[in-house]
Image: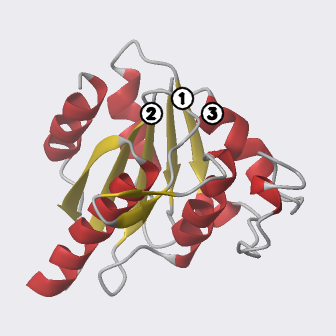
Amino acid sequence: MITIISDDSKNNFMDTIKESIKKTTKKIVVFKANDLNVEPCLACASCGGKTYGRCILEDDMQKILPQIVRSEKMILVSPIVYGGVSFHIKKIMDRISSVGDPRYYMKNGELVKKMRIPDLKYYMVGIKENLTFEEELLFIKLHEENINIMSVDGKAFIVEKKLDNSIIEEILKEIIYD
């Protein structure tokens, strides 16, 4: 199964992506981040202790997390904002930590945390509009850092704001058949 979470607050990317994936035999679950009620992480550490594996916040993440846990692949789609992701996607990224191992460890001199989802592949699709080269580079580096921290495989892609269906289909083929 593939879980796709998209911030469509500026454009409707989800329909294009969903149609491209439907051409495959993979089961998909989609969420529009901007339509969800997701509170920011409190950094309370309950998900790694007192309520192990479960966030204490009661909001729409209770719909998203079970789908992510059952997924082979997760795709986050976001407008690129100052080299990062939108606040809708950032809140979700922070809250995904509740399905990670509660213990951090050192890997190559860096503090990392494994996901409890075996073989999860994590992809990011960034939608660019009037970005500098440095902002594009920051977006790729942010995703590479998340892949490292989560100890998963994946890749980041950057596409133009005006989505070209052939480019999206190319990216999705790479993701689906990876």
Residue at 32% over, 70% down? 142
- Of mark 2 and mark 1, the one earlier in the sequence is 1
Residue at 39% over, 33% down? 19
Badge 1 vs badge 3, beta-carbon distance below 8 Å: yes
Identify the element where label 1 is drawn. Answer: loop
The three-letter amino acid code for the residue at tag 1 is: Ser
Identify the element where label 3 is drawn. Answer: helix
Q: Which mark is residue 69?
A: 3
* Residue 171 can be seen in this image: yes
Residue at 45% over, 73% down? 10
What is the count of numbered marks?
Answer: 3
The three-letter amino acid code for the residue at tag 2 is: Leu
* Residue 132 can be seen in this image: no
**154 horizontally vs 14: left or right:** left
- Identify the image quadrant of the C terminus: top left
Mark in the foreground, 2 or 1: 2
Residue 51 lies, in percent from the top left, at: 88, 51
**33 horizontally vs 65: left or right:** left
Badge 2 vs badge 1, beta-carbon distance below 8 Å: yes
The three-letter amino acid code for the residue at tag 3 is: Val
**23 horizontally vs 174: left or right:** right
Badge 2 vs badge 3, beta-carbon distance below 8 Å: no
**Residue at the spot of label 1:** 71
